[in-house]
Image: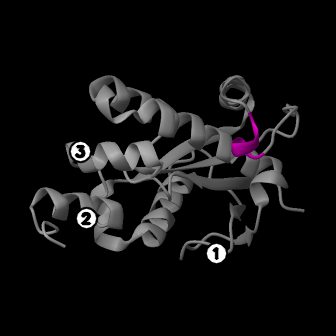
Amino acid sequence: MLRLVAGVDEVGRGPLVGDVVTAAVILDPNKPIAGLADSKKLSEKKRESLALLIEKNALCWAIGRASPQEIDEFNILQATMLAMSRAVQALSIQPEHVLVDGNRCPKWSYSSEAIVKGDGLIAEISAASIIAKVARDKEMLALDRAHPQYGFAQHKGYPTAFHLSKLAELGPLPQYRMSFKPVQLSLAARDGQLAGQ
């Protein structure tokens, strides 16, 4: 019987800005946490209260990330795998088995399996999705305070119509993922390459 099972999930593959953030969590079977679910299906308030419970009651948890520069260098999938590896390696207790949300695992030495829609099925993955989402949202709120004109507090970096219009108007910040097409288009427009097309 496997004992130390870590759940891993990522947040932020789709946004145009900021790190892709992952979390790894090993829950304590003696301290079950009620209400764990896919972070996308929880209200912001519920996510934040559950994140505090997870941080307090889990055997251990850790966050891994890959920067916009790494995303641009490796592509978003490889950067996500890198961030997942970093999260698991950062755990203070190393797991015997790792459950990863999605359809693939990083190339690592851990015993692991990928579970599609695992963030709604497996408590450990749900916990990881909540920790990662709360951490990334906080970073977007901090970016919003520094650059309020982009509206990061509302769209969290995802390519909404409002975000794209602001990106076209203001151009990208250094925190943007320059390899992503909407960012490239805004750079090209600013450089005048699209003038007359």
Query: Is 125 placed left or right of 144 in the picture?
Result: right
For disc 2, the marked residue is: 184
Residue at the (12%, 69%) spot, across then down: 193
Q: Nearer the viewer, mark 3 or mark 2?
A: 3
**Which residue is under mark 3?**
169
Q: Amino acid at mark 1?
A: Arg
Q: Amino acid at mark 2?
A: Gln
The residue pinned by badge 1 equals 104
Residue closer to the observer: 150 or 124: 150
Among numbered discs 3 and 2, the one appearing first in the sequence: 3
Residue 71 in sight here: no
Q: Which mark is residue 58?
A: none
Q: Is residue 33 left or right of residue 114?
A: right
Q: Position of residue 94 (x, y in %)?
A: 62, 53
Q: Is residue 141 visible?
A: yes
Nearer the observer, disc 1 or disc 3?
A: 3
- Mark in the foreground, 2 or 1: 2
Instruction: Read off the magenta span.
Output: 38-42
The three-letter amino acid code for the residue at tag 3 is Glu
Q: Residue at x 23, y 44 (%)?
A: 169
The residue at 88%/34% (across/down) is 30
